[in-house]
């Protein structure tokens, strides 16, 4: 009996040693380069996350403005890239005339001087709206951007044409497979080198539709994230990389990264080997929290070189790189 227990002990000891050595970043291949910086909605106004719900009008709770840019606009994207963003995230919504407007909210009431949804308006009509109409930092005493947002809602085509060589993360804001089909038709018209600069994420159904139409496009949804991470968490300690992890994008809430085998350098090297991009999102990832201050960055590993999600590219980029 003692011999059996001794063998079991030795086996478990060796197994533990193997798991440690196989997943420790101490022994990982050195990584070079700065983190990839993803600017959420370009450079826009930020707001308190306290008590936020799905129907919260975030334009009514912005912090006192430190700059003049409004999210999801071409000027905000220009500013984000100029300040050092590698990728800009943008949101798309379908229009009445079969285009995609770059706009975040489910309805227009929060930010604009109109009601309803983008589907009820043509792109030309949406261009007439004031997308700065609803922003206030003092509970409606003053509206900092009212009258300054007319004509600033762009179409997706406008963004692609204005930034022909920039990388974007395109967010489908619904779970409608028809929107996936519509976007796939747009993307099929782009050359291969342009598609390589794009990633699309959103609801499971539209993303599955897009992946079926354009198999080589980098995509992400809750379904693709789970199909990669669940088996990886189960067996990744061996070094095995599930096929679902290949050429995709992973948005990892910082609260779960301690459970990821090989975090951070070993895991990032493994994902690099299968052409997958890793972006860390602050908190639990529920409301697109970002790493928005120098203090936030102290929660990341030393010399972290993966992707970082931020709402304040103007504050984060100077820490890592010289702006253009």
Image (cartoon, grey):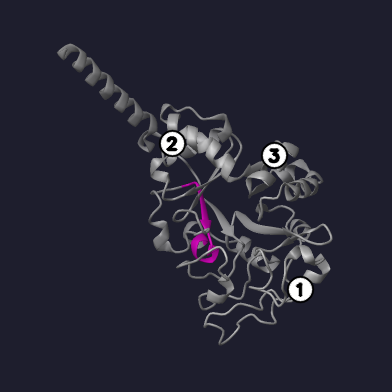
Instruction: Find the residue positioned furthest to the bottom.
Output: 141
Which quadrant of the figure has residue 16?
Answer: top left
Residue corresponding to mark 3: 211
Q: Earlier in the sequence, mark 3 or mark 1?
A: 1
Q: Position of residue 185 (x, y in %)?
A: 80, 46
Asked whether residue 16 appears in the rendered view, the answer is: yes
- The picture places residue 149, in percent across and down from the top left corner, at 70, 76
Q: Quadrant of the N terminus?
A: top left
Q: Are marks 3 and 1 in contact (CB under 8 Å)?
A: no
Q: Position of residue 41 (x, y in %)?
A: 61, 62
Tell me the element at label 2: helix
Residue in front for this viewpoint, 234 or 164: 234
Name the residue at 48% across, 70% down: 48
Q: Quadrant of the C terminus?
A: bottom right
Q: What is the magenta range?
A: 305-317
Residue bearing the label numbered 2: 266
In the displayed structure, does residue 110 sit left or right of residue 321? Answer: right
Viewer-side residue, 39 vs 53: 53
Disc number lying in front (3 or 1): 3
Q: Are marks 2 and 3 in contact (CB under 8 Å)?
A: no
């Amino acid at each position: 009996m003692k011999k059996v227990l001794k063998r079991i002990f030795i086996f478990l000891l060796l197994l533990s040693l193997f798991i440690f050595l196989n997943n420790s970043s101490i022994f990982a291949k050195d990584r070079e380069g700065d983190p990839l910086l993803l600017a959420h909605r370009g450079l826009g106004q930020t707001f308190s996350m306290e008590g936020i719900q799905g129907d919260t009008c975030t334009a009514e709770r912005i912090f006192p403005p430190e700059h003049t840019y409004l999210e999801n606009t071409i000027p905000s994207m220009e500013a984000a890239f100029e300040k050092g963003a590698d990728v800009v995230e943008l949101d798309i919504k379908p229009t009445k005339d079969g285009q995609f407007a770059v706009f975040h909210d489910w309805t227009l009431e929060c930010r604009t001087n109109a009601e309803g949804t983008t589907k009820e308006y043509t792109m030309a009509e949406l261009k007439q709206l004031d997308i700065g109409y609803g922003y206030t930092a003092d509970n409606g005493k003053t509206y900092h951007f009212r009258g300054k947002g007319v004509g600033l809602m762009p179409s997706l085509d406008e963004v692609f044409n204005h930034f022909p060589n920039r990388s974007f993360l395109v967010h489908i804001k619904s779970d409608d497979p028809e929107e996936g089909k519509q976007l796939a038709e747009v993307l099929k018209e782009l050359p291969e080198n342009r598609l390589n600069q794009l990633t699309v994420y959103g609801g499971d159904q539209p993303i599955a539709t897009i992946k079926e139409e354009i198999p080589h496009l980098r995509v992400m949804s809750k379904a693709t994230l789970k199909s990669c991470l669940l088996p990886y968490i189960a067996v990744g300690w061996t070094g095995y990389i599930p096929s679902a992890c290949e050429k995709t994008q992973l948005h990892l809430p910082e609260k779960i990264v301690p459970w990821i085998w090989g975090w951070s350098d070993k895991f990032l090297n493994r994902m690099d080997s299968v052409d997958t991009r890793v972006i860390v999102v602050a908190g639990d990832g529920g409301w697109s929290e970002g790493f928005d201050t120098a203090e936030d960055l102290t929660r990341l590993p030393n010399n972290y070189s993966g992707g970082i999600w931020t709402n304040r590219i103007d504050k984060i980029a100077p820490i890592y790189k010289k702006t253009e």
